[in-house]
Amino acid sequence: MQILDGKKAAQAIKDELKLDVAQLAVEGKKIPHLAAILVGNNGASETYVAAKVKSCEEVGFKSTLIRFEEDISEIKLLEKIEELNSDPDVDGILVQLPLPKHISDEQVINTVHPDKDVDGFHPESVGRMVQGLPAFVAATPYGIMLLLEHYKIDTKGKHAVVVGRSNIVGRPMSVLLSSNSPYGNCTVTICHSHTKNLKEICLQADIIVAALGRPEFVTEDMVKEGAVVIDVGITRVIDTSKKSGFKLKGDVDYENVAPKCSWITPVPGGVGPMTIGALMKNTYRACTLKN
Ligand code: GUN
């Protein structure tokens, strides 16, 4: 069994970007600028946004963090997005999800200008990705593709089973793995809460992407010997022995599944860092496409 080390692969991406940014500076060109919006005080979202801002610093991007109270109105939030859309210094806009219930995710996603949609959530970005056109691809599935590329995992003709059909992970993942591209060309099955015989389907998988958000859902009896297992789950589970009061659990029962795998991602340190690497790549692209 070998580890798909997302921390290491993401560092390689950031090192490369750092050189690219230094080159932009040498050429007197614009440095990428990411604007991140965080609404409320969700602990996990705070951690993710802080990590994104820190990564911007590491690679030499400019970043702006805009915070709003939980009770901000939808209209005020949309106005801020419009302001960032028309700010020529801002290349990428990210609104951290989930948002409070009184704000429509759809309205927010549709308001971000497609040229600044570094999260790849806008319908235009999704449509372009599905058609195989150059596009901003959502950070988690894009990060997983970059991880497969980093470790040169052979995907051609393999059966990939994606568990979870969310707009931000499962569905785009299924499209990318089936696309006619170097780390695509899989035969893909997408499973969800109404899937019958989930265990039997997973047992046929050469590659499993677990993205349903249920800790340790994928167990040893669901995984074929030699499979590649990608764990997208990152749920906070109470652990009083930890200073933070919680530990992070993936969607895969790592301890028992790992010995059966050819490759597996750890949690943390697998998919998580890659999503940030992917976001950094999207932000660089947003900047250099325009300038
Ligand atoms: N919440 C969970 N994942 C993501 C992501 O990739 N982008 C944003 N904006 N919010 C998220």
Image: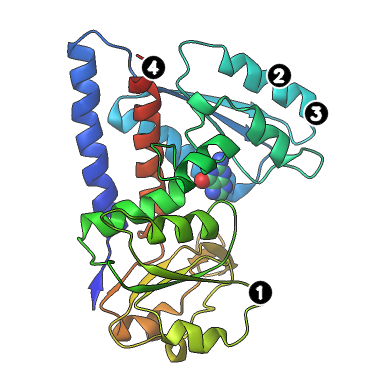
The residue at 44%/43% (across/down) is: 137
Distance from disc 3 to disc 1, alpha carbons, whole Å, reads: 33 Å
Quadrant of residue 159 within the rendered picture: bottom left
Q: Amino acid at mark 4?
A: Lys
Comes first in the chain, label 3 or label 1: 3
Name the secondary structure under disc 2. helix
Distance from disc 2 to disc 4, alpha carbons, whole Å, reads: 23 Å
Label 3 vs label 1, nearer the camera: 1
Reading the image, the residue beneath label 1 is: 193
Q: Residues within 10 Å of mark 1 (few under 14, many from 20)?
A: few
Comes first in the chain, label 1 or label 2: 2
Label 2 vs label 4, nearer the camera: 4
Name the secondary structure under disc 4. helix
Name the secondary structure under disc 1. loop
The residue at 57%/24% (across/down) is: 113
Q: Is residue 40 left or right of residue 32?
A: right
Q: Which mark is residue 250?
A: none
Comes first in the chain, label 3 or label 4: 3
Q: Amino acid at mark 2?
A: Glu
Reading the image, the residue beneath label 4 is: 290
Q: Which mark is residue 73?
A: 3
In the image, residue 126 above or below residue 172: above
Q: CB atoms at circles 3 and 4 under 8 Å apart? A: no
Dividing the image into four equal quarters, which quarter contains ligand 1? Answer: top right
The percent coordinates of residue 209 (x first, y second) are 44, 68
